[in-house]
Image (cartoon, rainbow, N blue to C red):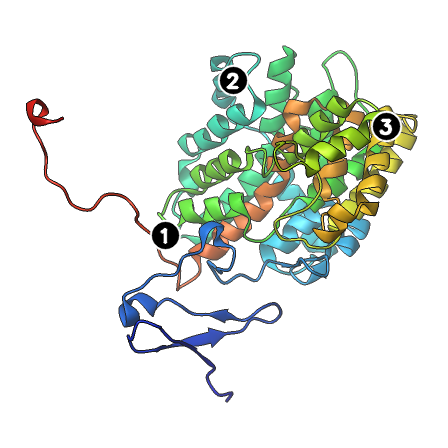
Amino acid sequence: MSKERIATLSFSDGRPSVDLPMLGGTIGPDVVDVRALYNKSGVFTYDPGFMSTASCRSQITYIDGDQGILLYRGYPIEQLAEHCDFLEVAYLILYGQLPNATQKAEFDSIVGHHTMVHEQLARFYSGFRRDAHPMAVLCGVVGALSAFYHDSLDINNPRHREVSAYRLIAKLPTITAMAYKYNLGQPFMYPKNALTYVQNFLRMMFGTPCEEYEPSPVLTRAMDRILILHADHEQNASTSTVRLAGSTGANPFACIAAGIASLWGPAHGGANEAVLNMLESIGGPDNIGKYIQRVKDKDDYSVLFGFGHRVYKNYDPRAKIIQRTCHEVLEELDLKDDKLFKLAMRLEKIALEDEYFIKRRLYPNVDFYSGIVYKALGIPVGMFTAIFALARTVGWIAQWNEMIGDPEQKIGRPRQLFEGPTRRDFVPMDQRK
């Protein structure tokens, strides 16, 4: 048996030092277990943004930001994106192992037969304005799923959790495509069980009752890769939101709706939309230099969207995959001379050769190219984050399920460093100065 490792915290104000256990995972940094710190010393830790705090134990996703490594259940993202379709990766994330042929066929069938939504749910859309942001629609509709599926809301029942996972993964493409169709004023397209997960989504997005829609194999593969790349990403803001909501005992549909709301922010899921807006505002290669100078100016609030990452201090491994996918899509659609793609390539080259960005280790991330792929596929800017939510749902539900089964999990309750007024007594209005 290995000897218990201890970290000793000493204080300069004379109070006694505190011994805290150190824990180690299979890979990655060790952690200091501070759960007993307050009882032993009367102090809290202070870590805005949780920069150095592990909030949970997990076996799902691992990131090494310095080396540019992303693993789903131990498998490198590059291998999964090259050899798997999305549902194969979804099975891996949910169950911890890649499926064999029989398991994959059964999983595909189960998900395929859960893609329909309750017909009354479709009426929810008429309550939104036609120009409502798709993420606003998704928040409302996904949260409402709990009103229709009462038979799978017992979070302490493993079978209920599994059925909820199937329903969420299966219905998100339908709900997302319906949001798009509602915005266009076109009729909803219902799923077809004979199609694959991604083929179904593309058909529900771009098909009409007037004629059959045949998705291109190249475009189908591109969308599969995009969904795989976004399926999970460790304890990011939206995943932490799902876990925090889930820690209260909330039902899975409410927790995923909370994750969607968190993902909506431009610093998180909305970053690919911000990249496209940035490229369009730059306009052309001749304006790149001026924009770069604005980014460097500390008195200017311009941002080089799509570069840098909270975790990655090396090239985002997903960015390399999506860059290659972007080339394939533009070639397939005969858009290789697309001005935005050429502008993005030029901007990337300039930024990667600039000492300012090199010193700060600001490399392209997955958002830098994904928006261009979406645009090439004919997907409007407002739908970018909604598709991100569709992909991330499998990671959210796996993380939520893992949290429910964790015996150490408690309701989330961060502490604070209070800097407001100390106790004071009420003064009647006629006595106030």
Q: Residue 414, which numbered label?
A: 1
State which quadrant residue 251 falls in: top left
Amino acid of disc 3: Pro
- Looking at the rendered structure, the secondary structure element under dot 2 is helix
Residue 108 position, x and y percent, is 67, 44
Residue 216 position, x and y percent, is 85, 30
Q: Residue at x 56, y 71 (%)?
A: 25
Q: Residue 125, which numbered label?
A: 2
In the figure, is residue 41 to the left or right of 351? left
Q: Residue at x 80, y 45 (%)?
A: 354
What distance separates the C-alpha of mark 3 from that of mark 2?
Answer: 42 Å
Disc 3 marks which residue? 285
State which quadrant residue 174 falls in: top right
Amino acid of disc 2: Tyr
| Closer to us: 264 or 67 | 67
State which quadrant residue 276 falls in: top right
